[in-house]
Image (cartoon, rainbow, N blue to C red):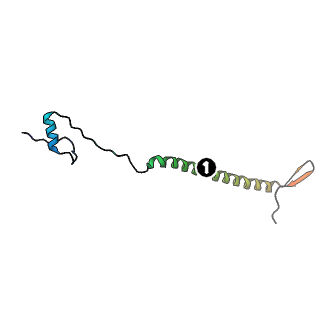
């Protein structure tokens, strides 16, 4: 009699003799594999929304910083222009836009 091993990896709780007997008689072999559900936290499902929210917050802070720098540059430019222009008069009322340096 030719002995052959069962195909694939056979679990250690299923005897090879039972498998060979089923092969010889033609009976089906039913192998039940328990695949328990994962009990851990699904990190990918949690991290993707936090990554999107973090990128959004970082982008908003970058936009705020850029606007602050733009307003600061505009204020400095307005101060320089007002200092160079001198007093401005409209209809007899004169405004001095910047103080003279002492």
| Crowding at mark 1 (Cα within 10 Å: few <14, some 14-19, many 20+) | few
Q: In the image, what residue occupies the spot 27% across and 41% down?
A: 32
Image quadrant assignment for residue 82: bottom right
In front here: 48 or 67?
48
Question: Which residue is tagged 1?
Answer: 60
Q: Position of residue 101 (x, y in %)?
A: 81, 64
Residue 5 in view of the camera: no
Q: Please, what secondary structure does the residue beneath circle 1 have?
A: helix
Most foreground residue, 9 or 50: 9
Indicate whether 84 appears above or below 48.
below
Q: Residue at x 8, y 39 (%)?
A: 2
Q: Residue furthest right?
A: 92
Q: Residue furthest top?
A: 26
Q: Which residues are magenta?
A: 97-101
Q: Quarter holding the C terminus?
A: bottom right
Residue found at x 88% / y 51%: 89
Q: Quadrant of the N terminus?
A: top left
Question: Is residue 72 positioned above or below 8 on the image?
Answer: below
């Amino acid at each position: 009699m030719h002995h052959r091993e069962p195909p694939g990896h056979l679990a250690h709780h299923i005897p090879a003799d039972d498998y060979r007997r089923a092969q010889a008689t033609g009976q089906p072999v039913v192998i039940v594999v328990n695949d328990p559900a994962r009990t851990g936290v699904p990190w990918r499902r949690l991290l993707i929304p936090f990554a999107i929210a973090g990128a959004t917050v970082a982008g908003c802070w970058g936009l705020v910083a850029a606007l602050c720098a733009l307003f600061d540059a505009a204020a400095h430019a307005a101060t320089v222009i007002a200092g160079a222009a001198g007093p401005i008069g409209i209809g007899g009322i004169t405004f001095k836009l910047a103080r003279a340096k002492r």
